[in-house]
Structures are given as C-alpha cells and as structure tokens.
Image (cartoon, rainbow, N blue to C red):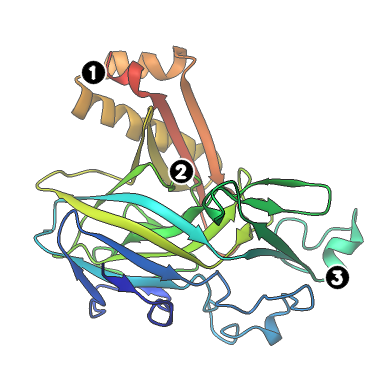
Amino acid sequence: MQRLLRDKARKFAFDARDTPLLRVQPGETFEIETWDASVGYFKSPADKAIPALRPGFDRTPPLVNPIGGPVYVEGAKRGDALVVTIEEILVADFSWTAIGPRRGPLGESTRWPELSSEYTTKIFRHTPGPSGTLRDGTLHFSDRVSWPITPFVGTIGVAPDREVTTSNDGQGEWGGNLDIRDVAPGNRIYLPIFHDGALFYLGDVHASQGDTEFTGTAAETCATVRLKLDVLPGKRIPWMRIEKPNALVAVSANRPLEAAVETATIQLMDWLISDYGWTATDAYCLVTTCPEFRIHVYQMCKIGKLSFVAGAEVAKKVACG
C-alpha cells in the first residue's frame, strides 16, 4: 500500500503548480500521515499559543494546518467529480486545544478576564477501546469528563481552478479548511475537479469537535488516514457534497451565516433535482416541511478570512422517495 509519510505532509497551500507526491489509480487504497494543526508544537500544557513562540507565525497568514499532497489520480480530468471514501482514521495518543488573548470570539472578553489575559493549552489523553486500539478509543477531557474519539478530516480538497489558496483560511467549492465533522470514516465526499489528476490534498485531523468549533481550535491531533479516490467522468457538481449511509449533505461556506445556510439548502435542492428526479417545486417545498431536513453549522469561527460553514441534510429514504 502506498503511503504519504508525515515528513512529506507539510504543504500550506492548495496549489496546482505543486509536483504530485503520490500517483494512485481510481479505487486504490492508500494512506496519508498527517500533522496536527500546529505541526507538533503543542506537546504539554506548558506550550502556550503565544504567536512569537510558534513556528510559522512570522508569516502572514501563519503556516498552520499542514496538508499532504497533491495526490494525482490517474484518469481524472477537469469537469469530472472526485469521490473520496475515508476508510479509517487512526489518531495519535493525545490531542490538544489552545485559547488565549485575541484568539476566538472571547479572546478580548471582559466578562471572563481569564480568557483574554491568560494563554491556556489543554492536552487530552487518548486511551484504547475494546479493540485494544484507538479506533474505538476514548478522549479524556478531564478526570471526570470523557467521550468517544470521533475523528474527522478538517482540511480537504483539490487544487482550485486558478488561485493558490492557503490551508489556513482557504475555502471554496473545491474544499479547504472547512472542519466538517461528517468528513469521517464511512462517508463519501464529492468534490469538483479543476485540473487533470484532481490534485488532492488532506490534513488537519481532529479527534473530536463540537458544532461551530467555537474557539477556533478543536481537539487537534496527528493521525494516519486510510482512503481511496474514485472518479465520476463528466459529473459536474457545484460544491462539496457528502453522502452518509443514510443521508445526503450539501455544503456551503459563506458570510453571514444565513448566506451559508441558504446556499447549502439550494445546493441540496439542486442535488435532489439533478440526481434524484425531483421537480424544483417539490424540492423547494420539501426543505421547508420535512422533519428529516436538518441544518448543520460545522464551523463558525471569527478568525481571519474564514467563512462560516453550513451543511443542509436530508434522509436518503426521503430523497429516494
């Protein structure tokens, strides 16, 4: 099995000019070893998120969210769709989150001065589950609070059509730093392709995350991601889509949040109309009446140029009639 090693997974931009680091056949399983979002800087509570101490923070934007790639998919062409199947994510033995002055929406809080005057790093221990591995392991938030490790890929995409976009704040129909909890094992992610070979990138795994990633940092961790890439020839899609075993999710990133929600809903309607035979009238009426239509707010961080990320979901049993 081919593997992109961690020491090679240190790109900080989605750039069509990059030389591919792997070449894979459609349907071929391979692995990418990923860094955490801060390239290994956080190892203990003593490692604070002080910009002057963090490698890469002398650049604008900073060198964070490293990604592995590009991966060249044989036979992929501009105008096709890429299908990403995440088979497994094996996380490291710890994860971290970091808060402090001028970080996140409460980085200048006067109500709770500790949030705006002190840097805090929390390290979360990971312990194996019944399988003896971290595949079904537990994240320990504290001595009293823990939950199952629920890993997903935070930054994923293909090289954009014309621009070069950073892994820190790049977002678009091609993917980017979207922090979508449904980019997880068992689901399929669909992306439009803008260059021959697709030029796929992946990184920024989280061991877990709450809705919105409110502080701007989730449970960040290193990981090994096992996946495969397939191609749908001539299949044009307007934005990232996610197919779960029992549901469809259309994604959008925009500001303000209501713009992201509206666009994601329209993208879901488009999916129902183009692939499932719905009329525009029925799709429009469905999203306002069906109790199995849901909106997810995956990422809503007030950080840099990041837009807010929403997903519009409907159950497959409804989509299929």
Task: Check whether the beta carbons of the residues at disc 3 and disc 2 lie within 8 A of each other.
Answer: no
Residue matched to label 3: 118
Q: Quadrant of residue 106?
A: bottom right
Residue 170 visible in this rendered orientation of the protein: no
Mark 3 or mark 2, whichever is nearer to me = 2
Residue 197 or residue 7, whichever sits in front: 7
Which residue is painted at 61% across and 54% down in the image? 128
Q: Earlier in the sequence, mark 1 or mark 3?
A: 3
Q: Is residue 32 left or right of residue 17?
A: right
Residue 3 visible in this rendered orientation of the protein: yes
Q: Which amino acid, by three-letter code, is at mark 3? A: Glu
Q: Earlier in the sequence, mark 2 or mark 1?
A: 2
Residue matched to label 1: 278
Q: Quadrant of residue 18?
A: bottom left
Residue 196 or residue 23, whichever sits in front: 23
Helix, strand or loop for disc 1:
loop
Which residue is painted at 70% across and 86% down in the image? 53
Give the distance between the C-alpha atoms of the residues marked 3 and 2, in whole angstroms: 33 Å
Mark 2 or mark 1, whichever is nearer to me = 2
Q: Can you give x and y, in whole percent of width and height, for residue 211 in the image?
A: 61, 43
Q: Can you give x and y, in whole percent of width and height, for residue 220 in the image?
A: 60, 63
Residue 182: assigned label:
2
Which residue is painted at 70% across and 61% down in the image? 125
Q: Is residue 167 left or right of residue 109?
A: left
